[in-house]
Amino acid sequence: MTPALLIMLGTIIASAIIGFLAAKLKFRAMRADTYIVAGRALGTMVYFLNTAAAIYSGYTFLGGAGYSYKFGAVAIFMWATSLLGYMIGYVVAPYIWSVAKRNNLLTFSDFINWRYQSRVLMLLAALISVVFNIPYVQMQIKSVSILLDASSQGAIPGIHLAAVAFILVVLYVFMGGMISVSITNVFFGALMLVTMLGGSLAVILKYFGGLPGLYSAVASTSPKHLTLGLKPILWFIGTIVGTSLNFWVWSTRVQLLYTARDVRVLRRGMALLSWYIILGTLWITHVGLAALALGLKLKDADYAFIEVVNLAYGQVALGLVAAGGAAASLSTAAAILLDQASTTARNILSPLIKRELDDRELVFTTRVLVLVLGIISTILAYTSPALLVDLYLLSASGVLQLFPALIMGIYWGSLSKYEVIPGLVVGELAVIALYALKMEPLGIPGMIWGLIVNLATLSTIYALRKTMK
Amino acid sequence: MTESIDYKPGFVEVLATIVLFILWTIPALFIDKPNILILGIPILWLYYILVSITTSIVITLLYIYWERRLRV
């Protein structure tokens, strides 16, 4: 067993122990709001690190460096996604939180139901949230598998160990719900930040002496990577707009907002999260350029960060960075799993049986669904791994179509389900059609075209409804 | 919608959001020039590093200003 693998496995086991211990905290009765949104009681540091760990996945951790290795400066859109996302969050999150607290809302789809008084729209939002998140969970298992492969230098089949690590996560989510998720994520979030910043700075300083040296080295090996020229400029701008607008429309992220103790925690959290990007993602993007300047030939761009660290500092450093990557993946998977299970129980099963689940039934059903959805994700990680990245892009596009329902619905008081539902359906159809035809007209991403037809449909029906009144 | 809005965004918050969106998108059309270096850093990269830091500072200042108003 290599030192890197030992460190990585040690971290995974330590996190699972934290998760199990957290589930043993003294709760006489596990109420639904305790199990699903941590009793809306998280203070600033726990809220901040839990949210950071849940939002930044293995895809970000490995993909941040991988994307700049492949597409150079185009990867800057990742900084914008989060930073503009936190600006929007600063503005809208307090309202969402206050409504959720007052009305005991537990999921994103609960909010939609409260806002539009429409079970159809709630069901649509729940289905989009659950289905489009399935590939996202699979992707986390795949990321852990990549890290295990790299740490063991191919000596062990990474996918089997990744599945075992994921099952440990499923078990502690099953036992402790959001309590276990949030306390484990404090550990994960801190580990991720230390490894992203430490690993990136160590590599850049060792080989290039600083950023000017890095840019100079890239200019002599592949100058086009210093420009936005590897994708159409409208793709860059459109992706910034699309991904930052959809930042808070992911149902897991809305559920994370509910966990804050008060609005002060939320807003302070947004400020801290924005600095997390400056200290983490911003540097990790530069590691992709470092791999390029060093002339590394990678079997996959996503290996950029771990390969560079391995080259620069050897097995122990690789183990630490791989542990950070595993933390990023597993923390995200845990939060999504809990959100999917609670959304399915409360917003899909409950309307189907035409009865509100009481507190105990809701906790029990959510727990069972955590196990069921965990098993489904594990099986899918084995059976259809090649689809992951494509499906993720489709997911992001699909989820963006909920933007008018959530964000515009907050401030546009007379917007109703009669406009939102057709807009949502047309937007989703446009996204799926463009995805199936592999088209991005004028170089603008499909998610933006979906949003344009969504808004056009919504506005037209709104105008017609007002005229007919 | 059956309840009043408790946390309507203020004029400054909305203005800051719009200005930041503009700063992140429109200049990309004009500053993609790898030959222009400032302190050894291509202008595109320097610009986006500075916009990133500015965005974080704006969110932090908005929070500090909001909390001070709460105390008064």
Image (cartoon, grey):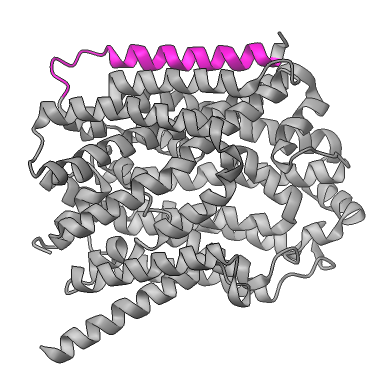
Query: In the image, A63: left or right of B12?
Result: right
Residue B57 shows in the view: no
Q: Position of residue A321 (x, y in %)?
A: 65, 26
Q: Nearer the viewer, residue A439 or B34?
A: A439
Question: Residue reaching furthest right?
Answer: A220
User: Most prominent secondary structure in the magenta stretch?
Assistant: helix
Query: In the image, A106: left or right of A394?
Result: left
Question: Which residue is found at the position 28% from the left and 49% from the top?
Answer: A126
User: Magenta residues, as a range?
Assistant: A4-30
**Residue A20 lies in the magenta-colored region:** yes
Question: Residue reaching furthest bottom?
Answer: A467
Question: Which residue is found at the position 69% from the left and 76% from the top?
Answer: B30
Q: Position of residue A256 (x, y in %)?
A: 32, 40
Residue A335 shows in the view: yes
Residue A210: quarter of image:
top right
Residue A360: quarter of image:
top left
Query: In the image, A319: left or right of A106?
Result: right
Q: Position of residue A47 (x, y in %)?
A: 35, 35
Total label count? 0
Q: Position of residue A466 (x, y in %)?
A: 16, 86
Q: Where, quadrant-wise, is the C terminus of chain A in this rendering? A: bottom left
A201 lies above or below A246: above
Question: Which residue is found at the position 29% from the left and 26% from the top?
Answer: A177
**Residue A209 lies in the magenta-colored region:** no
Query: In the image, A116: left or right of A52?
Result: left
Q: Where, quadrant-wise, is the N terminus of chain A in this rendering? A: top right
Question: Which residue is found at the position 30% from the left and 32% from the top?
Answer: A43
Q: Nearer the viewer, residue A420 or B14?
A: A420
A425 lies above or below A268: below
Question: Residue reaching furthest front?
Answer: A383
